[in-house]
Amino acid sequence: MTVPVGRIVFWSVLASTPLALMLFAPRRWGGGFLWNLRRLAVDYRWHLALFLFILVEKNWIDSLNDPIRGVFGDKTWLLHAIEGNFTYWVQSTFRSEALTAFLNVHYIWTYVFINYFTVILFAYRDDKELANLAALNYSLIYVLAIPFYIFFNVQVTSDYIPGMDALLYHSGQSFFDFFVRVDPLDNAFPSLHTAIPFGLILVTWWTMKRRGYTLKDWEHRAYLVFLIANFVIYLFSILYLGIHWVTDIPGGMLVGLIGAVIADEFRYDFFRACRRAEWTTLHFVRRALRPLRPVGDRVRRAGGRLLGGLVP
């Protein structure tokens, strides 16, 4: 029986939210947990909308992979010419069943958790600046990676280097089925498992310094350390599991840096523009519906009379 890996990861990440907020929210926030979730969904709706945008964008980009690759060709040979079989040495040197099992789960679950929870944490704490930075940086990194994924296709190392095993993809039928559905296996450069945590580390660190704090007294210290620790683990796991080339790491860090710089520059302007567009749209909708208001009033009055006649 095939286990639905995607659904398990999705629902377990969502279920971890209360515990994660207890661990990483530096102090209790007034209003209660459910009240703050409702406030988060309303006040940070544009941040959540960016996640939906990225999901749609990713599916669209994946659909372009095969036809465009046929035109521009595969570039994996170039990365192999640069670094040879170094990742095969990493895998064969450190290989163990326990390490493989841990890194398989970490590669999928923690990556999804970081992408989702970072914005949730800052929004729950009502830290608009950091929530803006996290959501915008995350979205920009995906957008910046599009040209590489379309025009610079690079296969995963386990598909190219002789003798190297796909420890993640072939760890079980469930993992294999999951990745066949969601991963075209030729979007290795740049590494988003490098780019996204690195970009989040940068924008969080810059905000800490801008506000005059050090890591010792920073209220988000625990989460920043968590991001750094997982970033370091990814630097090893993406090579060990037979996924990325060494060259994918500086490529991912460069994309993460560019995304962080742009996000830092427009952290307020972008969401102001979104809210302004929302207000303008609602204004025109209200004006368009204004002639229908008397009709609505008559319908409500008629409904009231009908109910009044039915109820003794």
Image (cartoon, rainbow, N blue to C red):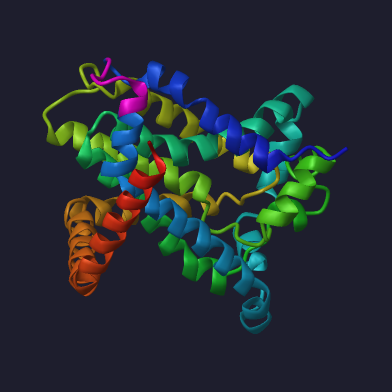
The mark total stands at 0
Magenta stretch contains residue 206:
no
Q: Principal SS element in the magenta part?
A: loop
Residue 159 vs residue 302: left or right?
Answer: right
Q: Compared to 144, does 27 lie above or below?
A: above
**Residue reaching furthest to the left:** 212
Let me know if residue 136 appears in the view. Answer: no
Q: Nearer the viewer, residue 54 or 301?
A: 301
Expressed as whole percent of the image width and height from the top left, the position of residue 127 reads: 22, 34
Q: Nearer the viewer, residue 286 or 59?
A: 286
Magenta stretch contains residue 31:
yes
Please name the residue shown 43% across and 34% down the image: 117
**Residue reaching furthest to the bottom:** 71
Please name the residue shown 68% across and 74% down the image: 66
Q: Where, quadrant-wise, is the C terminus in this rendering?
A: top left
Q: Nearer the viewer, residue 124 or 200?
A: 124
Expressed as whole percent of the image width and height from the top left, the position of residue 182 reads: 66, 55
Please name the residue shown 72% across and 37% down the image: 91
Residue 92 vs residue 278: left or right?
Answer: right
> In terms of image quadrants, where is residue 266?
bottom left
Expressed as whole percent of the image width and height from the top left, the position of residue 225 reads: 38, 24
Q: Where, quadrant-wise, is the N terminus in this rendering?
A: top right
**Residue reaching furthest to the right:** 1
Expressed as whole percent of the image width and height from the top left, the position of residue 214 reads: 19, 23
Residue 43 vs residue 12: left or right?
Answer: left
Let me know if residue 305 appears in the view. Answer: yes
| Magenta-drawn segment | 28-35
